[in-house]
Image (cartoon, rainbow, N blue to C red):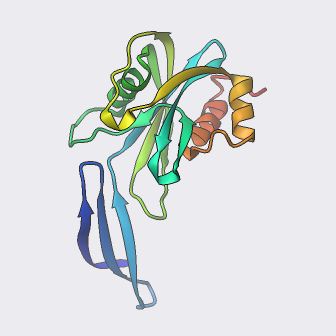
Amino acid sequence: MIQIATREVYRNRWMTVREDDIRHPDGSPGIYGVVDKPTAALVIPLENDGFHLVEQFRYALSRRSWEFPQGTWPDDRQTTTEELARAELAQETGLRAATVERLGSFAIAPGFTSQSCDMFLATGLTSGEPDRDPEEQGMRQQWFSRAEFERMLRTEEIVDALTMAAYARLLLSGRVTER
């Protein structure tokens, strides 16, 4: 596939949307719409065989969503994703972690976005006050046992794909055992 042309069609402080004209290997033309976003960080706050989750209103879904703390910087800040993970954890939950361990990375939605996400496991947690952004008004945080977390996955109370993928990666890492 060869890119023939590209044009930016939208930009805000969180993302850029571009449209690429391409040529397929057989010579036929094509077009792709791509959402470019910086690498995100997701953090799994593990404590007492359970997890701290945040619940917030997700505008695109028109509903509230339980998920692991996650996000990106709203500017062009250059830091490590571990620093971002620590910042998201503190900002959204008020928790600070003694240890943050990288579990891996994955592509968020490779059919339309270039964004990837690095996953981290946070342990040795201490409480503090959250410092949420205006977009996070109404966010709340709660600890759930693993059994309750898994029930929420089965009953689709948790629908966030990043949270599901991170939990699968955590199980595969061997840092917690499957039930």
Q: Tell me where residue 67 appears, x and y as whole percent.
A: 54, 35
Residue 31 lies, with reference to residue 140, above or below; the image says: below
Closer to the camera in the image, 28 or 133: 133
> Along the horizontal axis of the image, is 110 left or right of 166?
left
> Along the horizontal axis of the image, is 163 left or right of 29?
right
Q: Quadrant of the C terminus?
A: top right
Q: Examine the image and state in which quarter residue 117 appears.
A: top left
Identity of the residue drawn at 42% across and 84% down: 24
Identity of the residue drawn at 69% across and 43% down: 156
Residue 175 lies, with reference to residue 108, above or below; the image says: above
Q: Examine the image and state in which quarter residue 150 appears.
A: top right
> Along the horizontal axis of the image, is 129 left or right of 156?
left
Q: Tell me where residue 20 appears, x and y as whole percent.
A: 32, 75
Q: Tell me where residue 177 appears, x and y as whole percent.
A: 72, 24
Q: Tell me where residue 45 appears, x and y as whole percent.
A: 52, 22
Residue 51: in sight, yes or no? yes
Identity of the residue drawn at 39% across and 32% down: 137
How many callouts does the rendering have? 0
Considering every residue shown, the one lying at the far bottom of the view is 27
Considering every residue shown, the one lying at the far right of the view is 179
